[in-house]
Amino acid sequence: MPRTLGYHYVKSGYGLWLPGDDRGSWSQAWDEQIGFTEPHTLNPGDPARQRMAKERMKHEPVRLDAAMIDAVVGAIDRCASSSPWRLAAASTESTHMHLLITYSGLDIKRTVKWLAQETTKAVHRQTDHVGPVWCEGYWCSYVFDTAYWTNLVQYLQRHHLCRSESAKLYSFLAL
């Protein structure tokens, strides 16, 4: 069995990537009229499903402003400094964040849940934003290959360069 090097974790802002989105969606969704959408598979865009998801939203979609991004980055740094894992690369921007997290032996599902909670608390404490910050789910892949790990670091560097100046790129480590 290959050794786990770490995880690529992506979390989107609330309401920004709904079931039925044109880019496809990974969400598990059920509707009596149009049926079940398979979880953990990329489901095609569906305007009816997207409209229904928008109608169910209780808050406006969330785009992080510069102060919110700073709060998120600070919270992630605090979490990393008190954890056995480290960030190999990370990018936080107005619509989502990417974290490349080293393997630590901790349950990654609990770790990313904690990160989402801590970043949400930081946004609420340090800005005027109320309500949800992040979407319900997340995307997280396991990384086993050093070449893939290096490619992810480079991807996050390129990804960041293509984004707005308010985005934050930080904490690059070598394996």
Image: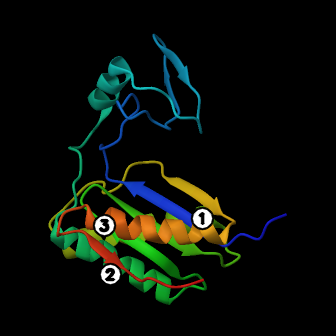
Residue 143 percent location from the top left of the image: 64, 64
140 left or right, relative to 21: right
Residue 81 percent location from the top left of the image: 48, 89
**Can you name the residue that lies furthest to the top here?**
33
Q: Secondary structure at mark 2?
A: helix
| Whether residue 121 is visible | yes
Q: Secondary structure at mark 1?
A: helix
What residue is shown at x 23% (from left), y 45% (from top)?
61
User: Which mark, residue 148?
Assistant: 1
User: Which mark, residue 98?
Assistant: none
**Residue labelled with disc 3:** 160
From the viewer's perspective, is residue 129 above or below residue 17?
A: below
Which image quadrant: the N terminus? bottom right
Q: In the rendered image, which quarter is residue 142 located in?
A: bottom right
For the residue carrying disc 3, how many other residues have a C-alpha within 10 Å: few (<14), some (14-19), or many (20+)?
Answer: many
Q: Secondary structure at mark 3?
A: helix
Earlier residue among tags 3 and 2:
2
- Residues at circles 1 and 3 in contact by the CB criterion of under 8 Å: no
| Residue nearest the viewer, comparing 148 with 112 | 148
In front of the other: label 2 or label 1?
Answer: 1
Residue 28 percent location from the top left of the image: 53, 33
Earlier residue among tags 1 and 3:
1
What residue is shown at x 32% (from left), y 20% (from top)?
47
Cα distance, mark 1 to mark 3?
A: 18 Å
Cα distance, mark 2 to mark 1?
A: 27 Å
What residue is shown at x 79% (from left), y 66% (from top)?
2
Q: Amino acid at mark 3?
A: His
**Residue labelled with disc 2:** 74
Q: In the rendered image, which quarter is residue 6 located in?
A: bottom right
Q: Amino acid at mark 2?
A: Gly
From the viewer's perspective, is residue 158 above or below residue 47?
A: below
Q: Amino acid at mark 1?
A: Tyr
